[in-house]
Image (tube, rainbow, N blue to C red):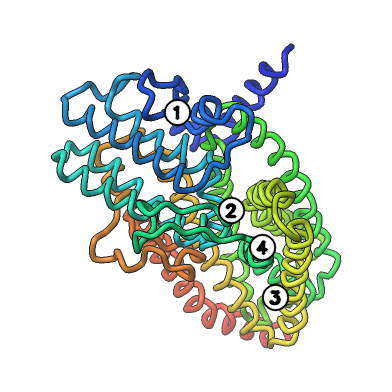
Amino acid sequence: MSIKAVKRILCLLLVIAAAFGAFGVTVYADEESEKADYYLSYKKYVAAENPDGSKTVTYNDITDQISNLLEEGLRRYESGAEREGDDGYYKPFTNSYGFWYETSGYEKTVMGYISGARVNEVELQFSNMKKAVNNGASPDEVRAEVDKLVEMLREDANTLDKLFGYPISSEDSEDGSEETQSGGSGLAWATFGAVFGIILREGLEAILIVGAMVAYLIKTENKKGTIYVYVGAVAALAASVVLAIILYNITSGTSNSIPQEITEGVTALLAVAVLIYVSNWMISKAEADSWTNYISSQVSSSADSGKLIALGAASFLAVFREGAEVILFCQQYFSRAGSMEHGFPAVFAGIILGLAAVMVIFVMIRVFGVKIPLGPFFMATSILMAVMSIAFLGSGMWELFLDGGLAEKIGGFVQSMAGTIPALSFMSGNDVLAFFGLYPTWITLGPQIILTIITIITFVLTIRKKPGENEKKKAAKKAGK
């Protein structure tokens, strides 16, 4: 069996394991267009224009090519061409994201050197553009969306090219003058900040969950149960390495990063289910009497083991959700490190200090969490799990429907839900909101609002139910005496 066949089998298994997300995976064609002024994929562009790797491909070059591709899509759209097929108008619009913005490394570079929220903002504009095309908007309306997208890409390209010391032409620069700036030590510091920020940002979500669960088990005198949480986290790290290798081979072979988005989205939704379960269990033990009775009656039962396994699963999913992406990010920065001054020390320092910062946060949660009184601790931990489940739901829906292409594959009403809500456009590009999975689209906010309502109702019913139960237990104890 050839290596190519093995890659295809691994890709198929990954998509099948993704279950829900597999419905939205599209096997996009990767043929090079006959026209010389645009390319349907970054891979074809590099093969034709830079086969020996001697040319420096700047981010303004990439923006130029994306712009050319979008112009071709507009030309076809205005001429009344068919939607599908190699000569259809839709392929240039959809390939501009999946086969250019992501696979050229543009997305990851912006996320590291500018911000993750900026990536979300640009991705949302890609979605708005494709939504306009699918809704049959006028050519002028589609052009307005295209022009807005290219303007955003150009702004980011100028920022990145200036940082990396690439020349910026007078046509691309804001003031009309040519610019050139050496990356030097400033680029090394920027690389350190990018790697450190990625490790901290992606690790924070996981460590909040893992640290809270460990503190929970220690506080409830079930220290042995922490092994489930630790094993889940370590297993997730190992699985992330394996998945990163698989995804790297898949995406480098097909010029398509959609399998990574599908995997992250499905993992996030699985994490939502587990975190909701864990949150409800914790809130049910929010009073000392409830936990004491639980420990005395079930500490050695199979039911208790089931709860501990659930904690281990939550730990695994929290770490695994972003693990592979972090590894792929670091791989990208290592590949750049050799071409910059102090590149490798900057990357290693970012990784080491980023992990150290994550561990400090873990220790703080573990130490200070144990000192909080039992009732408030259970309540706070339960609320944290609920908030993180809502955040994971938003980011999971984003990764599946926008990044994974599920919205455009379904089309119609679903795709209209994936566009910007005009009244909430201020939310776009906000790092804090992005951390909590809050985006100005109904495809993400709708499910989050529903889950929030269900969570609040569950909490209220659980809290109101407890006083009556405690009175009955106290009365039963007195009667027994």
Q: Give the amino acid at mark 4.
A: Gly
Residue for badge 4: 184
- CA gap between label 2 and label 3 equals 25 Å
The answer to which quarter of the image holds residue 205 is bottom right
Residue for badge 3: 291
**Residue 256, how many percent across, how many down?**
52, 33
- Horizontal side of 302 relative to 19 (left or right) equals right
In front of the other: label 3 or label 1? 1
Residue for badge 1: 26
Residue for badge 2: 271
- CA gap between label 4 and label 1 equals 42 Å
Disc 2 element: helix
Task: State which tag comes first along the sequence, 2 or 3.
Answer: 2
- CA gap between label 1 and label 2 equals 25 Å
**Foreground residue among 183 and 398:** 183
- CA gap between label 3 and label 4 equals 58 Å
Task: State which tag comes first along the sequence, 3 or 1.
Answer: 1
In front of the other: label 4 or label 1? 4
Q: Give the amino acid at mark 1.
A: Thr
- Horizontal side of 447 relative to 242 (left or right) equals left
